[in-house]
């Protein structure tokens, strides 16, 4: 399975279970499972389990199932086992908003800017998902100072430091212009408290 194949849409979805706990060594670990149902009548339905330490490449297994109903039953059993093992779902209030921001030369959005937005969104979605370190929620283009622009990519993350580190690695690996990247962190429900955790000039202020 490659980075994007088999990934579910990482939004609120009854067909996905994602749970976390802190292990004996103090590391945050996660387990998640989802039902990958084919769109066509002859497409197979798969039950997929993914697990690992937040921020690190995870391990996944998939198994074919005869029906979507059977897969949903497996999903319910998976959740029960996770709860028994001390895992729990995280509320939004327990997580962080992490914003990957790219500086743009102009407030006018060009085709090149749109390509960057698509490429960055896809790359970060896969990179973070397979490490349990964040869910890309939305993107936006906004005006910057002196007729410049900015691309903001909003990520919901259980561990802000791990997400920031993963974002930096992903942007470098995918050659998404690391020199233009800033990353801000805030409580998930308080974007007004956002502060820079990475910037090209070392600044701590962060403006969305």
Image: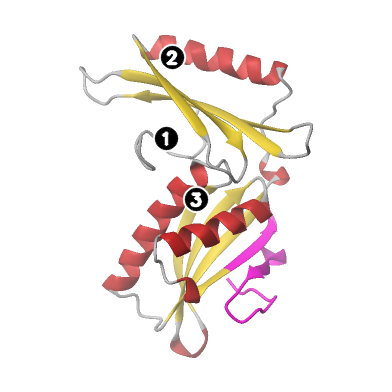
Alpha carbon separation for disc pair 3 and 2: 26 Å
Residue drawn at the location 75% of the way across and 32% of the way down: 23
- Tags 3 and 2 touching, CB below 8 Å: no
> Marks 3 and 1, how far apart in space?
12 Å
Q: Residue tagged by mark 3? A: 136
Disc on the earlier residue, 3 or 1: 1
Compare residues 73 and 86 and report the one nearer the observer. Answer: 86
Q: Which mark is residue 8?
A: 1
117 in relation to 105, above or below:
above
Q: Label 2: state its secondary structure.
A: helix
Q: Give the CA distance from mark 1 to mark 2.
A: 14 Å
Q: Is residue 140 left or right of residue 23?
A: left
Name the residue: 42% across, 9% down.
70
Q: Specify the segment rendered in magenta.
A: 183-208
Give the percent coordinates (x, y) of residue 113.
Answer: 34, 71
Q: Residue at x 50, y 50 (%)?
A: 137
Residue designated by label 2: 71
Q: Vertically, is 121 above or below 84?
A: below
């Amino acid at each position: 399975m490659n980075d994007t194949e088999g990934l579910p849409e990482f939004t609120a979805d009854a067909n996905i279970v994602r749970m976390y706990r802190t292990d004996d060594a103090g590391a945050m670990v996660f387990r998640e499972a989802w039902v990958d149902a084919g769109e066509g009548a002859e497409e197979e339905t798969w039950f997929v389990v993914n697990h690992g330490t937040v921020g690190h490449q995870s391990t996944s297994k998939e198994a074919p199932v005869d029906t979507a109903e059977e897969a949903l039953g497996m999903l319910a059993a998976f959740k029960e086992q996770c709860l028994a093992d001390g895992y729990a779902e995280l509320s939004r209030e327990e997580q962080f908003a992490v914003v990957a921001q790219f500086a743009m030369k102009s407030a006018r959005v060009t085709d090149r800017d749109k390509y960057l937005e698509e490429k960055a969104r896809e790359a970060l979605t896969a990179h973070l998902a397979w490490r349990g370190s964040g869910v890309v929620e939305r993107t936006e283009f906004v005006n910057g100072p002196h007729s410049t622009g900015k691309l903001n990519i909003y990520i919901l993350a259980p561990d802000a430091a791990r997400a920031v580190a993963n974002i930096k690695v992903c942007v470098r690996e995918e050659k998404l212009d690391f020199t233009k990247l800033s990353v801000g962190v805030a409580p998930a429900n308080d974007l007004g408290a956002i502060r820079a955790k990475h910037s090209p000039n070392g600044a701590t202020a962060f403006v969305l």
